[in-house]
Image: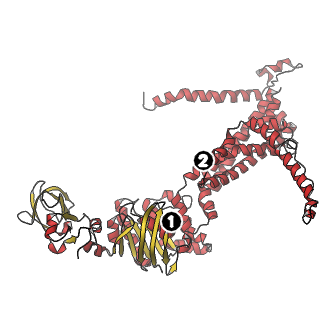
Amino acid sequence: MSDRKLPRLLQSPAVLLLLVWMLIPLGMTLYFSFIRYVLNSLRRPEWTSPSLSNWRGFGNYEFVLNSKDFLFAIQNSLFIVCSILFLTVILGVLIAVLINKSFPGQGIVRVLLISPFFVMPAVNAVLWINMILDPVLGLQGIAVANLNDLAAALRDAPVIGWFFALWPQLEPISFRATQTSAYAVIIMVTWQWTPFAVLIFMTSLQSEDQQQKEAAVLDGASSWSQFRFLTLPHLGRPIAIVVMIQAIFHLSLYAEIEIVSRGNGNKNLPYLIGEFANNNIGAASATGIFAVILANIVAIFLLRMVGKTLME
Amino acid sequence: MGRIVLKSVTKSFGDVEVIPPLDLTIEEGEFAVFVGPSGCGKSTLLRMIAGLEDLSSGSIEIDGQDATQVPPAKRGLAMVFQSYALYPHMSVRKNIGFPLRMAKMAPAKVTARVETAAKSLNLMDYLDRKPADLSGGQRQRVAIGRAIVREPAAFLFDEPLSNLDAALRVGMRLEIGELHERLQTTMIYVTHDQVEAMTMANKIVVLRAGVIEQVGSPLELYHRPRNTFVAGFIGSPKMNLISGTQAQKYDAATIGIRPEHIDVSMTEGSWEGYVGVAEHLGSDTFLHVHGSGVSEMITVRISGDISVNQGDTIYLTPQSDQLHRFDAQGTRIP
């Protein structure tokens, strides 16, 4: 046996397992997306078991494309993912730079900062929507009510009263509503995933060359210039990694959307798949294939964009 | 431009005083080398001049102006680091132009200045490359280029050659020397290598544990070392330092004789010994002589080649006019 054959032979069980693991679900999804396959049909009982005789061609795809929610789900998916990426990267960089300086209590602050990442997504969503964002019982409702009471009390005060008289009555925002449920999801996922960005950026910052910074100080670079010309390019690669990993993860958000509004005004592709999968497996599979294509486009596009602007 | 005066400068890290009060003047246009064993505070001293380290007390004057509280960028000094500290994601052109860009100079002027500097350093062909694509010597030249474009009052070099291989080091030594000839700007150079110090400096500052042991020209240090530390540190191979009865003959606690100032004979001389290791360099031969009863080992440098074998008996005679005498504290007796 030659030198190369043995290592390949030893690798092959793992490679085979991974291939099977990936190809079988993908193959089945593809297969289901081209046939009529529903879980329950009194009128056409033959559709309830998958079979080639139920071949529908691109019919499922056509059905999905023509459904009223599809385009909205794609737009909404992209809107949610891009907003979360934008916020987590900016907050992550700022917080990482801030806590990279040494200060008393550094260890505890770092652990506290990382902790949101260990909360389960469903728990995260329940906590945010019921305890923080709720317009009556949540922190938001309490804060708005108290602000209104305070303004009302100060309205009768001498000298400054006229100023508060100009204040309008503040209205709490209902984050379960059609117009706002996507924002609620963005807020809670950003809160949960910023620590991930902070963690990655912080490790990268610690490997930054201090002599380069000293050279920049001598070259007359301000703190901002040092950040712009040294730190930010140094973070280019970790930013690309954070963007890539999060893009893939957040395209498949489900629990938060389900808990916040059950898809009311806020669907993404996985949620649409879930809705179809209540009965129409064929349409759900076709949507799944669209989701795979979208994920790949987003990943390639983001990677290129981030790479070009920051790694030059 | 470029007269630097240190007045009773001190530096402490916590309770540890690394530099006790120190006074030093570096004249305009001088090539001053700080030399000493590692941990002697020479790099700290340079960083204090650059403004990267704060002074614990004392003051620094640059061109007659108190610069103690002046931020590093405003001191008009340029520094070349041991690790080169080039900006890895910028091309050579952008690296060299960075200080000018930070000074908000017009882009056309920046380009002109960068190209002048690049031409003088033979970097024209590499202007659009990244530091990662350059060799060690080229990176060093880019670092020097970045310092030159600023037209600083003085250059500070922090062991700039220690990451280069031996052949390149000799070449760069010469280039830095020529740069000083051409620019006539004050340069302060830190090294632990006494050969670099001897070949490049107008003024050598020998440091030990933050204390200046001696300041002087290379030959002054070679011919009239102020104490046994300087005597042992300057010169290669090291000076033979002999104490005991032989030293008492000369009314000294310790006498020093350089390896090149000992005459060798196979038949007669003051000290008798046998040859240990002989190092043949072609142009010179270094003999390590044992068993003379004077000192455990005496190093002798002979010009040219000599045919001796290990174990041969040999006679040594120090040239009495080249003898250095030191008292019990190690200080030179005139």
A6 shown above or below A102: above
Residue B219 figure quarter: bottom left
Element type where label 2 sits in the image: helix
Q: Answer few, some or many: residues within 10 Å of disc 1's Cα (few below 14, many 20 plus, some between 14 and 19).
A: some
Q: State the image coordinates of residue B248 (x, y, percent, origin top left).
A: 15, 68
Horizontally, residue B178 falls left or right of residue B294, namely right
Image coordinates of residue A150 in percent, x first then y, are 88, 54
Q: Label 1, label 2: how many angstroms apart (C-alpha)?
A: 27 Å
Residue A127: tell me if it is visible: yes
Residue A107's tag is: 2
Q: Residue B316, position in %: x, y?
A: 12, 65
Question: For the C terminus of chain B, which image quadrant?
Answer: bottom left
Left or right: residue A170 versus residue B195 is right
Q: Are marks 1 and 2 on the same chain?
A: no
From the viewer's side, name the closer residue of A33 and B50.
B50
Of A302 and A195, nearer the camera is: A195
- Per the image, the residue denoted by label 1 is B53
Image position, residue B301 (x, y; %): 19, 64
Question: Tag 2, which chain?
Answer: A
Residue type, mark 1 in image: Glu
Camera sees residue B141: no
Mark 2: few/some/many CA within 10 Å (<14, 14-19, 20+)? few
Q: Quadrant of residue A133?
A: top right
Chain ID of residue with mark 1? B
A196 sits to left or right of B306: right
Position of residue A228 in the picture relative to residue B160 (left or right):
right
Kind of element beneath mark 1: loop
Image point 62% across, 64% down: which residue?
A223
Relative height, residue A230 to residue A286 (above, below): below
